Image (spheres, rainbow, N blue to C red):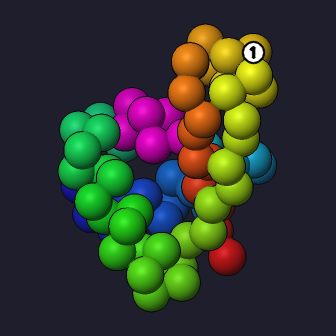
Amino acid sequence: MSQASIYECLKKSNEPLAAQEIASQISSNTKQVCAAIRQMIKYREVGFVEIDRFEAKIRYNSKRRMKLYFII
């Protein structure tokens, strides 16, 4: 798992992705993906949007707010 694989995964996607989606697409651990994404955000390679818990419930069946990541 590398930042390059995360970048390529996001580049192929037409919409922002959650960390869990990225991890499943690149066959990696979600914690490792989140750590790499934090570094990518720090260097402004990746941006994010935050969705509220109501939209997260509808789209991802999650009870929490979520961040969705995209290429800047």
Question: What residue is rendered at 43% in x and 34% in y?
Answer: 20
38 relative position to 60: left or right:
left
The residue singled out by tag 1 in the image is: 58
Quarter-of-image position of residue 17: top right
Q: Place residue 43 in its image quadrant.
A: bottom left
Q: Does the rendering let one see residue 11?
A: yes
Viewed as shown, does residue 20 lie left or right of 13? left
Amino acid type at image mark 1: Ile
Decide: is 60 above or below 66: above
Q: Is residue 55 magenta?
A: no
Depth check: 4 or 41 in front?
Answer: 41
Residue under the point 72% across and 35% down? 52
Please state, as top left, top right, bottom left or bottom right, where the C terminus lies in the image.
Answer: bottom right
Where does the image place residue 2, in percent across and percent down from the top left?
A: 27, 63
Q: Is residue 45 left or right of residue 34?
A: right
- At mark 1, the secondary structure is helix
Magenta span: 18-25
The correct choice, above or below, for 11 with respect to 56 in the image is: below
Q: Position of residue 46 (x, y in %)?
A: 55, 71
In the rendered view, tell whether residue 38 sits above or below residue 58: below
Query: Residue visible at 40% across and 63% down?
Result: 37
| Label 1 crowd (10 A; few <14 / some 14-19 / many >=20) | few
| Picture quarter with the N terminus | bottom left
Q: Main secondary structure of the magenta part?
A: helix
| Residue found at x 58% / y 47% | 67
Residue 69: x %, y % from top left: 59, 55
Q: Visible in this render: residue 25?
A: no
